Image: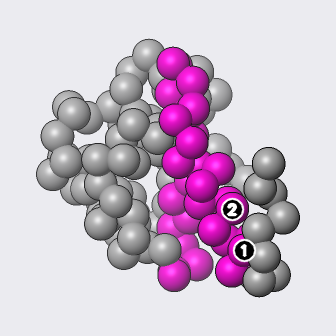
Amino acid sequence: MNSQKLAVIGDKDSIILFKTLGFLTYFPPLETDEISKVIRRLDKEGVPIIFITEEYAQMVPETIDNYKYRAFPAIIPIPNKNGSIGIGMKGIKENVEKAIGTDILNN
């Protein structure tokens, strides 16, 4: 897959490695409207996979929910430079439970 068709949204320090790998990278100001605009623009540009730091994802849950039942773009929360706050794992657990009817990932 062409890395130019993958995008990462987050704070500069957390996503700088993705930029060196050739991903489209965005580190907008910490404002909900700006983050939502970037997601909508990437969707219009046809970017199929958008990684977003959990911190930024937590700021725009309504925007992310708008894409939840669409095949593309897949919006995937990732930890930031400080580590995970659990949003990504929570989404995985919810999807597994929905798919098989029980939470097999519960510790």
- Horizontal side of 66 relative to 53 (left or right) equals left
Display coloring: one colour
Which residue was labeled with disc 1? 97
Q: Is label 1 in a helix, a strand or a loop?
A: helix
Residue for badge 2: 93
On the question of residue 46 being in view, the answer is yes
Instruction: Determine the residue positioned at 44% across, 16% down.
Output: 13
Residue in front for this viewpoint, 106 or 13? 106
Q: Is residue 103 magenta?
A: no
| Spot occupied by residue 40 in the image (x, y as percentages of width and height) | 30, 63
Percent coordinates x, y for residue 54 in the rendering: 46, 41
Going by the numbered disc 1, the residue's amino acid type is Glu
State how many labels appear: 2
Amino acid type for the residue under numbered disc 2: Lys
Left or right position of 85 against 37? right
Q: In this view, does 100 lie above or below 107?
A: below
- Quarter of the image with the N terminus in it: bottom right
Q: Give the range drawn in magenta.
A: 69-98
Q: Residue at x 19, y 48 (%)?
A: 32
- In the image, residue 75 lies in the stretch drawn in magenta: yes
Residue 102, how many percent across, how many down?
78, 76
Determine whether, in the image, residue 11 is placed left or right of residue 5. left
Residue 12 location, quadrant: top left
Residue contact between numbered discs 1 and 2, judged by CB atoms under 8 Å = yes
In front: 100, or 68? 100
Q: Quadrant of residue 95?
A: bottom right
Residues at marks 1 and 2, CA–CA distance in whole angstroms: 6 Å
Residue 56: image quadrant is top left
**Which residue appears at 79% of the width and 48% of the height?**
107
Disc 2 packing (10 Å; few <14; some 14–19; many ≥20): some
Residue at the image position 49 percent from the left and 74 percent from the top? 68
